[in-house]
Image: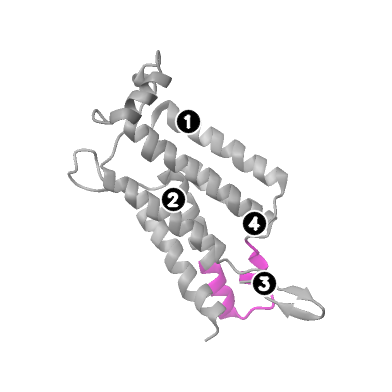
Amino acid sequence: MRPDAVRESFTLPVLFLTVAAAGGFRVPAAGTGMQFVHPPLMALVLAVLVLGVMTRAGLLTPALLVGDERTGLEKASGAVVLVTLFLASAQVIQCLAPESGLLNVLYYTFMTVLLWNTLAAAPDRMRLLHSLFVIFGSAFLLKYVALASLYDPEGGIMRRTLMALLEGVALGTLQHAPFAPVTGYVAFFVVLVYLIAVTLLPRRAVVVADTAITVL
């Protein structure tokens, strides 16, 4: 079996399904029990927008997955990749969102603006990958590093620094549900696997001097 066939029929679906499953994992701060959170409607809407941005930038080429030139089995395999990519995108978005309150509203507002701006800018494949790394990386640091330290009674110097920067702001207005540290580690794994998986999406062949060269 060709390497690209293995990647499309096995590697990508497994990676995206792993992200979709682990993205909802939560452990309360008390460390008792586990929770699995499904993505809200807004995360599903933004996942559609993410796929649109990927398509415009050439990172995702639906015709390579479900085009007319493919056999029925190949189309089914490509459809699985698209569906699992959508589910993984929605879970990554909700995984990085503050759980409730004003911060949750601000997160989805800024994420919508950033993605629309990226769509309008029509970046190429590499620029979009850089943008996704920055957007998701910044959201991860905000939720699992900055907010976790802010609401940790033993947050140390980082908590004192953030409290000084937010002097005069009541934490009650910035509702946040803290989780056990293991949740942050799982979220880091989820974001990393997702970003690696999207770089493996199939690309169109580049023709140079009448020779088709596929850039993997």
Q: Residue furthest right?
A: 209
Kindly report the distance in space between the C-alpha atoms of the residues bearing marks 4 and 3. 24 Å
Q: Earlier in the sequence, mark 1 or mark 4?
A: 1
Query: Where residue 105 is drawn, which disc sits there?
Result: 1
Q: Which residues are magenta?
A: 60-80
Give coordinates of residue 53: x percent, y percent: 64, 51
Q: Is residue 5 visible?
A: yes
Name the element at disc 4.
helix
Give coordinates of residue 168: x percent, y percent: 40, 13
Q: Is residue 25 above or below residue 63?
A: above
Majority SS type along the magenta span: helix
Residue type for callout 4 = Met
Mark 2 burial class by Cα count in 10 Å: few <14, some 14-19, many 20+: many
Q: Residue at x 28, y 39 (%)?
A: 179
Residue type for callout 3 = Gly
Give the residue at mark 4.
Answer: 126
203 on left or right of 146: right
Mark 3 burial class by Cα count in 10 Å: few <14, some 14-19, many 20+: few
Q: Please tell me whether mark 3 or mark 1 is closer to you in this view.
A: 1
Q: Is residue 45 visible?
A: no
Residue type for callout 1 = Val
Q: Is residue 16 above or below residue 50?
A: below
Give the residue at mark 3.
Answer: 67
Query: Where residue 91 is drawn, which disc sits there?
Result: 2
Q: Earlier in the sequence, mark 4 or mark 3?
A: 3
Kindly report the distance in space between the C-alpha atoms of the residues bearing marks 3 and 1. 38 Å
Name the element at disc 1.
helix
Kindly report the distance in space between the C-alpha atoms of the residues bearing marks 1 and 2. 17 Å
